Amino acid sequence: MCRGLFGREARGEHGGAEGNDGGGGLSFGRKYYGGTGLVGKKRRPQFHVAVASVATDIGSVEKAQKAAAKESQRPVYPFAAIVVQDEIKLCLLLNVIDPKIGGVMIMGDRGTGKSTTVRSLVDLLSEIKVVSGDPYNSDPEDPESMGIEVRESVVKGEDLTVVLTKINMVDLPLGATEDRVCGTIDIEKALTEGVKAFKPGLLAKANRGILYVDEVNLLDDHLVDVLLDSAASGWNTVEREGISILHPARFILIGSSNPEERELRPQLLDRFGMHAQVGTVRDAELRVKIVEERARFDKNPKEFRKSYMAEQEKLQQQISSARSFLSSVQIDHYLKVKISKVCSELNVDGLPVFLDVQFCN
């Protein structure tokens, strides 16, 4: 059984989702190799700690390894080179700037560049501080984004080794099992070492990053339920054969789908803060330009990416600047009232949409 914690009840018909956040503390139980068993009340931990001493140096060997890994990666089509998809690009950039918006659902016909646009976003993602070796990408400065073992280390006053790493973009394949998504018992360690160990899944890897589900409308219903709970609460609970694990799963949920293949569940659509529609390009000149640009990329990816390097760097600077100013942005009361009136006139149920519009402003 795998479920998110503090799950909210979702309503259909494009309605809002009612939710409540639990208070109180956590009762820690048995400690296993690779994870911590939890017993008692399962509520969001509410405490604040400070990292007294953090090692932030990255060795030259590690830098060389990162550079080599980057070189060996499959070339990604530049985000700045994508034409026409202005609505999708705006939605994606807004979510990168402020993840509180709640993700984006992209709907459109086959061959309209939905997946290419989403995957091209990876080049623009900034670096974040994570605890070295932690499978949950724990934030050394935010207890709400820490794995349990890291939190315990901080409480004990232990030093944490911190490194800079790119924000993860995790692809959730349609054929993924529940164990692969949520995590399960590490069978190899159980057989070789005789210990109960937890093997984190894709939700752990996506913490503080982006979870992308292509053709999300074709995803199995039970996996949809898992995503709904985790996206709503930001936490994932895994219970397997005597092991109970709680870990943070705060991610930007991005989905794409083709409505012709299968309708999307209203409960899932309700979890996305933004919705973008893309259609087939009808302009003859634009179609030719798109094909020619793609041919250039396929012929020589490195040279093609180099030609857009200046535009990519400009976008990165704009994103970084927007993120730094985000906390100081204030919305006037009359604008909030105007947003509320628009939502009422459109018969929008619930308050999440109203909140999302505020975040976007």
Image (cartoon, rainbow, N blue to C red):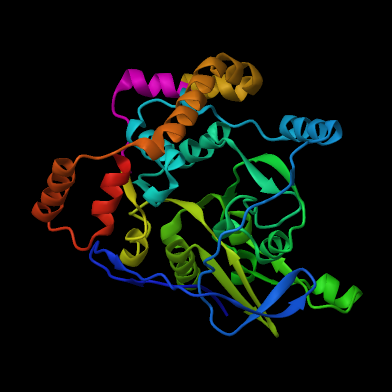
| Residue at the image point whose x is 45% and y is 25% from the top | 318
Residue 262 pos. (x, y %): 36, 60
Asked whether residue 285 is drawn in magenta, I would say: yes
Residue drawn at x 27%, y 45% as measured from the top left: 358
Q: Position of residue 275 (x, y in %)?
A: 32, 48
Residue furthest toward the right? 192
Q: Residue at x 56, y 14 (%)?
A: 307
Q: Nearer the viewer, residue 212 or 259?
A: 212
**In this view, 13 is above or below 82:** below
Q: From the viewer's perspective, tell me whether residue 253 is left or right of residue 13.
A: right
Decide: is 101 above or below 216: above
The answer, for residue 173, to whether it is visible in the render is: no
Can residue 8 be seen here? The reply is yes
Nearer-the-camera pick, 208 or 45: 45
Q: Quadrant of the C terminus?
A: top left
Stretch of the chain drawn in magenta: 277-291
Q: Residue furthest left?
A: 345
Q: Where in the figure is residue 191, as x and y percent of width and height?
A: 87, 77
Asked whether, in this view, residue 48 is left or right of residue 66, the answer is left
Q: Is residue 17 above or below residue 161?
A: below
